[in-house]
Amino acid sequence: MKKGLYSALLLSTALLLGACGNAEDTSSGSKVAQTTKDQTATANSAQTNEAVDKLVQVFPQKEMKNVVTTSVTLAEMLHILDVTPIGLPTTTHQLPKEFETIEKVGSPVEPDVEKIVSLKPDIVIGPISVHTSLEKKLKQTNVASAYLPTDSYEDLKNDLTALSIVLKKEQLATSYLNELEKKEQKIIQSLDVKDRKVMILFGTGESFMLMNTNTYVGSLVNTMGAQNMITKVSKSKEAYVPLSMENVVATNPDVILLVSHGDTTVALKQFKDEVKKNGAWNQLTAFKEDRVQALDYSVFGYASIEKAPQALEELQKILAK
């Protein structure tokens, strides 16, 4: 039953996206390019279908009216699907205004399980990153739970589709994802940044890590078509990879993106002060051409399907410099 529903949902989306790309072109070169594009879209749709199938299966086979989520990312999705939860995480991030008066269940990392149980939810939905710690506590109760990956942009799209299926909000998800795709393509097609070599750093001072393509910012850079240079020096699938100065110099990025907490101006100054201690940084193209940018934490600080278009627009401006 569920498989039929999400197949229909994804087919609807795929058909619309295919229609957007099928403008008539009489040149043989364009026909070949279009055929290749259609084949790629079909393959991607099949992969998405399989990913969503797996996500749907983590939910219990029952009606879920009373929902608690321990994630801001997932709370945004409930808002998109017109589902009002009965419990939300305590957070400094801005939640939808309609959710301001909803009961808070504590930190996203260490939620108050007693508070959650007192709300008598049908389901607790959290990010897979807290599965081990939260499930250990919830197992002692009769509360059902489900955990979704919320790391990359693709994760978020798949999560929204899966949630729409189990919460019976498929039409809202289809509409939202179609509009999101239009915005995404408009941004991408307005300027080509495929030649840009990008390095994404997370942290401060000497504790910097490289962000892989399966992180939120990394996946957005990948969506833009730019090259995340971590893929040139590491085969690791880990989201965060230790920084190697040798690799930094070898890849010589055109753009360096800095992801850190707090004020971007302060973060950028601290970073530049730190790297002055190692002259190798100043030899990089990104430094020579002043393309070292601290990203706005309010936009890039957590994985957000609602803020993704804004994030893509800001990335485009940075990469186009």
Image: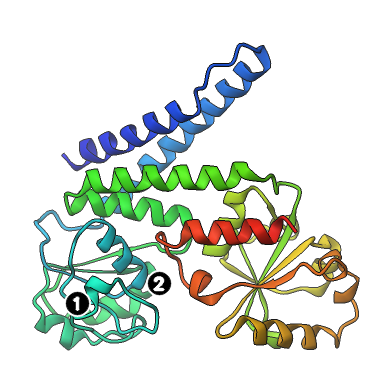
Residue at position x 64%, y 56% in the image = 316
Quadrant in the rendering for residue 102: bottom left
> Measured from the top left, where is residue 115 in percent x and y?
16, 86
Decide if residue 37 is in sight here. yes
* Number of residues whose C-alpha sits closer than 10 Å to that of mark 2, classed few (under 14), some (14–19) or many (20 or more): some
- Distance, label 1 to label 2, CA atoms, is 19 Å
Residue at position x 38%, y 42% in the image = 178
Q: Is residue 137 above or below residue 4?
A: below
Give the side of residue 95 with respect to residue 222, left or right. left
Give the label on residue 129, or none. Answer: 2
* Residue kind at label 1, given as amino acid type: Gly
Q: Is residue 201 above or below residue 21?
A: below
* Number of residues whose C-alpha sits closer than 10 Å to that of mark 1, classed few (under 14), some (14–19) or many (20 or more): many
* Residue kind at label 2, given as amino acid type: Ser
Give the side of residue 197 with respect to residue 239, left or right. right
Q: Name the residue under label 1.
A: 87
Residue at position x 23%, y 45% in the image = 170
Check the image and tell me how it is coloured: rainbow
Q: If you read the primary sequence from the N terminus, does the residue marked by circle 1 or circle 2 appear first?
A: 1
Front disc: 1 or 2 = 1
Q: In which quadrant is the C terminus drawn?
A: bottom right
> Measured from the top left, where is residue 220 in percent x and y?
56, 57
Q: In which quadrant is the N terminus drawn?
A: top left
> Measured from the top left, where is residue 298 in percent x and y?
49, 75
